[in-house]
Image (spheres, rainbow, N blue to C red):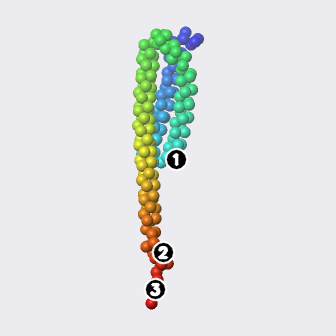
Amino acid sequence: MEKLKDPSAIGRELLVLLRRQKEYYEELNALARRQRELISTGRCEDLLSVLGERQKIVTAIGKVHREALPYQEAWNEIRDLLPADRRSEVQAVIAELRELLDGLLKHDREDCDELVTRKKQIAEQLTAAVKGREATQAYAGEGRSDRSPSRAGNNFEIRG
């Protein structure tokens, strides 16, 4: 990596990449809040749109990550080359990124759990509805014996 010879350029470029990544994580956070709202209100069609937007941001984060990979791989060497103030600044942004990522992962796990719970509730409601319908049909079937009004009229005899 030719840029390793210029610590000033390394620090600037690394901070640009890390800050861009942080902006993307903040966008993901905003979409995660929107996602939570849609899940809680059951608006699944809008949820698909939010998930699509999140995927675009994740793709962009992947691109930034690939650009930052040479710095990450040489981090021990780079860290030693950076002036103390720049090194602290880079480490602070990295800490913020970790915090944002941890929050996003926690948020997504909670949303996933909520969706699983909703799925179970819907499955239980469907099962109850099917059983209720079957019971109603069975009851209606029992009511249609020879004593039912439709057949009783046919068997009624008047004798004189």
Residue placed farthest to the bottom in the image? 160
**Where does label 3 land, which residue?**
158
Q: Which amino acid type is shown beneath numbered disc 3?
A: Ile
**Where does label 2 land, which residue?**
151
Q: Which amino acid type is shown beneath numbered disc 2?
A: Arg
Q: Is residue 117 visible?
A: yes
Q: Position of residue 100 (x, y in %)?
A: 43, 29
- Report the Cα–Cα distance between label 3 and label 2: 16 Å
Q: Earlier in the sequence, mark 3 or mark 2?
A: 2
Residue drawn where x is 45% and y is 26% of the image: 97
Instruction: Compare residues 61 and 39 and report the one nearer the observer.
Output: 39
Contact between marks 1 and 3 (CB within 8 A): the answer is: no
Tag 2 secondary structure: helix
**Where does label 1 land, which residue?**
45
Label 2 Cα crowd, 10 Å radius (few <14 / some 14-19 / many 20+): few
Tag 1 secondary structure: helix
Up-down relation of residue 135 to residue 32 (above or below): below
Depth-wise, is mark 2 or mark 1 nearer the camera?
2
Label 3 Cα crowd, 10 Å radius (few <14 / some 14-19 / many 20+): few
